[in-house]
Amino acid sequence: MFYWFLKFLALGPLLRLIFRPWAEGTHHVPTSGPAILASNHLSYSDWLFMPLVIPRRVTFVAKAEYFETPGIKGWFQKKFFSGSGQVPIDRTSGSAAAGAISTQLRLLSEGEICGIYPEGTRSHDGRLYRGRTGVARLALEAKVPVIPVAVINTDVVAPPGKVFGKMARPGVRFGEPLDFSRYDGMADDRFILRAITDEIMYEVMRLSGQEYEDLYAQDAKKRDKDREREDEAASARAESDEIWDEIKPD
């Protein structure tokens, strides 16, 4: 109930009024029954704008800690996250990845729509990165269609590392549902999982217009930070050499 209150009476109307989000291809989202919405991930605001433009509830999995904080703050936090379409990861499965799949399988079996970010984390530079194969395993085990989704301009509204950026109209594009029933029974084949994931990411790339890099987003972040540190060190050495050239005796 709180979810629909936020979406249609409280937070949703406010976001529509301020940001005027647009959407394309919403007819690809089924009016009933389970499906997976596989989206790119540009901003923490993605999970607000993507569900906002379709009438159905979209459920995401979130860290269990968000639902277990003690005290009044924890109570409000739990109510907000659960009310905004997020559920805690089932931690009885031994790992976060297995717990997320277990939770999403349960939701899909109940006819829900699950939102998932195959990149696993937000893009730090606007590029689209390699998808992790959990989305493929989930699609095969649940036997449900995957709808590729592209969010647009959310990284302008709320850039990585900032609460708010610039005013812009965020948009969401939904692609045609992808059917992977031809791979039934192959959920343990890592080559099949990779092929499915790459097909999904190709459709997301086509919808979003992002530049694609065949590298995991977390690895790309580490690489770029290492390069930044190397550049800073090189700049410091060059500056030190310049100072020495000026003060060294002839």
Image: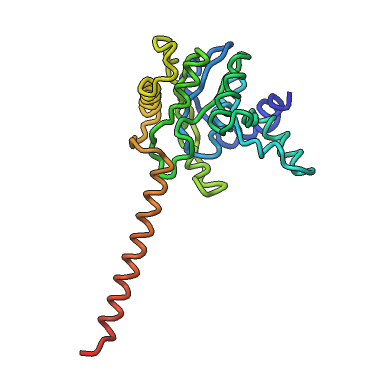
Q: State the residue lying farthest toward the left.
A: 250
Residue 221 x/y as whole percent: 41, 46
Left/right placement of residue 200 relative to residue 168 reads left
Residue 101 x/y as whole percent: 55, 25
Closer to the camera, 65 or 13? Answer: 65
Closer to the camera, 231 or 167? Answer: 231
Residue at 62% x, 36% y is 63
Left/right placement of residue 37 relative to residue 81 reads left
Quarter-of-image position of residue 229: bottom left
Left/right placement of residue 224 relative to residue 48 reads left
Looking at the image, residue 12 lies above or below residue 144: below
Q: State the residue lying farthest toward the right.
A: 72
Residue at 24% x, 90% y is 249
Closer to the camera, 114 or 50? Answer: 114
Quarter-of-image position of residue 7: top right
Task: Give the position of the N terminus as an image quadrant.
Answer: top right
Task: Give the position of the C terminus as an image quadrant.
Answer: bottom left
Looking at the image, residue 105 lies above or below residue 242: above
Q: State the residue lying farthest toward the front.
A: 94
Residue at 62% x, 21% y is 57
Looking at the image, residue 47 lies above or below residue 180: below
